[in-house]
Image (cartoon, rainbow, N blue to C red):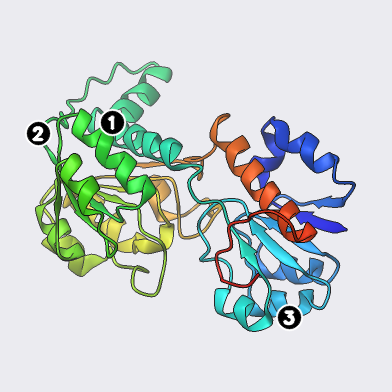
Amino acid sequence: MRILLTTCSYQDTPGPHHALMDAQGWDIVRERGPLGEARMLELAGDFDALLCGDDAITRAVLEKSLPRLKVISKYGIGLDKIDLPATRELKIPVLFTPGVNHTTVAEHTFGLLLGLTKQIVATAAAARHGEWLRLTGHEILGKTLGIIGLGRIGKEVAIRARAFGMEVLGCDPHWDEAFAATHAVTRCATMDEVLVRADVVSLHCFLSAETRGMIRREKIATMKDGVVIINCARGEIVESADVVAALHSGKIGGYGADVLDCEPPPADHPLLAAPNCVITPHIGSRTYESVPRQAMKSLTNLINALSGSGECNCANGVM
């Protein structure tokens, strides 16, 4: 059995997943992802399974991978880099790992928020270079946090926001009324309502045709002056050029993101040099606690699927 392993977090972080994989007796080919379509096409066709991260698994890659490819096991929950309709048509199961990283990503969300609102990143960087830069920050107590996407991660963010004394708004097509009532989350009928009312907007929705580029110039114009936007979802949900322009004008008071529309980004990516902007390199779920959980889930999914026994989390209904 030949397996292509591309996720760097899986490979770099210690945990029981390494011993369990070694025990399978598979032929493991390791690459440093995320891999673009060109590299995936070079590799396609020689593997029984993919244990992947955010690699470009397009229709062309899938077609070239057959007839050998039996299953794709995604390390993580975001499936936007996989052509799911094509996997259904070609009858290739796609497995994923829901419920393993929501705590870690919610914590990272608040790391970005506090880093921006308390001017921690800017002043710490200045101090490291010998400058005693005493900037004035903001409290988040009493501010309104608007969460777009109230799934597992969004809910964990809401719980932490309430602990900080924030008012919480939410918008999600699959509204959990019981959770909202327990944690005092006010439901907004539309994303636009969240954008208009929130002091801080936190993005936790999947990338889709509906959400791609949804934070753009026209929407930003409706938001409060000085709004802070946190993006721990997908970089393509925002129009980078429009966010940069709004940061320079002050319309957006701060932008914190763990994701970009191109990863890794070119050195001249405009967000990297924008004012009041903190970018981390997609590490929101990369902790010593979360990585082994994700790795074990993706691996046990794969073992069960290849053996035809046991439960696995299928994302595309092909099993």
| The disc label shown at residue 196, or none | none
Q: Position of residue 2 (x, y in %)?
A: 86, 58
Of labels 2 and 1, earlier in sequence is 1
Question: Residue 53 is drawn in which quadrant?
Answer: bottom right
Q: What's the amino acid at mark 3?
A: Glu
Q: Judge depth for marks 1 and 3 and give the one in front.
A: 3
Q: Position of residue 252 (x, y in %)?
A: 20, 50
Look at the image and tell me in which quarter the N terminus lies.
Answer: bottom right
Q: What's the amino acid at mark 2?
A: Gly
Q: Judge depth for marks 2 and 1 and give the one in front.
A: 2
Q: Residue at point 25% right, 41% down? A: 158
User: Between marks 1 and 3, how big is the CA–CA gap?
Assistant: 46 Å
**SS category of the residue bearing label 1:** helix
| The disc label shown at residue 142, or none | 2
Q: Residue at point 34% right, 61% down? A: 238
Picture layout, residue 140 above or below residue 275: above
User: Between marks 2 and 3, how big is the CA–CA gap?
Assistant: 53 Å
Q: What's the amino acid at mark 1?
A: Leu
**SS category of the residue bearing label 3:** helix
